[in-house]
Amino acid sequence: MVYECRVYLRGAVRCVAVEAGSEREAALAALKTMGPGSLVLSVRPAGRKRVLSRAKLGARDLEMFCRRAQALLGAGVTAQEALEVLARESEKPALRAALARVSESVRSGFSLSAAMKARPDVFPPTLSATVAAAEEAGALPEAFRRLASHYAREAAFRDRVKQAMTYPAIVAGLAVLVTAGMFGFVVPRFAVLLAQSGVPLPGITRATLELSRKVPQILGVLLGLVLAAFVLSGLVRSSVRLSLVWERVLFRVPVLGRIALRAGAARLCRTLALMLETGIPVPRALEVAGRTAGLESFRQAASRAESVVRAGGRLAKGLESPLFPAAVLKMAAVGEASGNLSGMISEAAALMEMEVDALLGRLPPILETSMLLVVGGNVAFIMLSLFLPILSLYQSVQK
């Protein structure tokens, strides 16, 4: 686990990130790193107080940071100078502040990866672990190039998901607005005309008028449900057990469940492939991939696979789970046998991303058709309930 230690040394307070099994071990490691005359002021898990922080960067932001870092380091600029330049030119205040802090730590003698680990709210474990491996190998520009490509693929994948969901979301919003407008404005005006006409009202009309009168109460109930959903989502994120229950339910939803399942597997495999390409050992790569998986089910799957590999087993054996299709397990086994594990895992990630793209292509027509049926059904119900009494009035006048 990564701990952030505040250390007093030579009249200044500095922060250092260390990996340790407990807070005591972290404090001892920080004292050893800082040297004689240092005093540990506090120790806490890195990023614990930033859980609700909005400083976390998106994939596009991380891609641009990595590309700029690669260009500067590739031109022969030192890491210290590159950090200072990037801090000055960054458009994101959170990244600017984090880079200034990282630059200060590097100037104090810490490695770039150690300084980044102290800000997990800005720099994800994937980035800091890759930088750590590249520092050992002396290949920082190449590491940032791979990281930039990784975040570019992740951003493109998320953009495709958002694009597929945008139109159905707009249709759903319009459906709600149309229904609310009909019950809130159209029906009440017709209700006055029908009351003045004295025509006997059929059951469907009486039901529509009753719903129209209860629109404020219905909106209140809907608002309460939305608030309850927000609270429940917070509880699910904070509880491992609730997260697993929610994910099991999600995975059983037609089309949507398969998209979530394959997208989670693709993200884990893509991160794992990046770690392996950088030269990180398989157990450590699984640990980092699990921490960035996004879904608790995949975190636990990566942890189980890590235990199997540390015990001397094969990665393909450790990944055996309903979460991963047979093709992925077979490709992992072939990669282990051929010595090209990172390449085969990357191919497996690409295969699952293509499957997600195909499923996303099916999703919008299904959602659009469903929304149109709902909207059409609501409008037909309201129109029928309003025009039946008018038709009866017309017929009585004709007689």
Image (cartoon, rainbow, N blue to C red):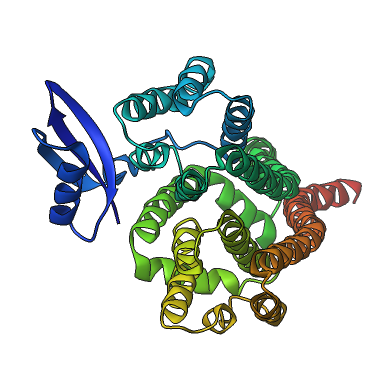
Q: Position of residue 352 (x, y in %)?
A: 72, 66
Residue pictured at 37% horizontal, 29% vertical: 102
341 shown above or below 381: below
- Note whether 10 is above or below 5 in the view shown: above
Name the residue located 36 percent from the left edge and 71 percent from the top edge: 241
Instruction: Please identify the residue farthest to the top as the structure is shown.
Output: 88
Q: Compared with residue 300, is residue 90 higher up or lower down, i.e. above or below?
A: above
* Lateral position of residue 261 relative to residue 303, left or right: right
Q: Is residue 293 left or right of residue 377?
A: left
Front residue of 135/208: it is 135
Residue 111 visible from this viewpoint: yes
Residue 294 lies, in percent from the top left, at 50, 57
In the image, residue 325 above or below residue 194: below
- Identified at 66% across, 67% down, the residue is 345
- Which is more toward the observer, 230 or 271? 271
Whole-percent x and y of residue 239? 33, 63
Q: In the image, residue 288 lies at what x, y percent? A: 46, 58
Q: Is residue 183 visible?
A: no
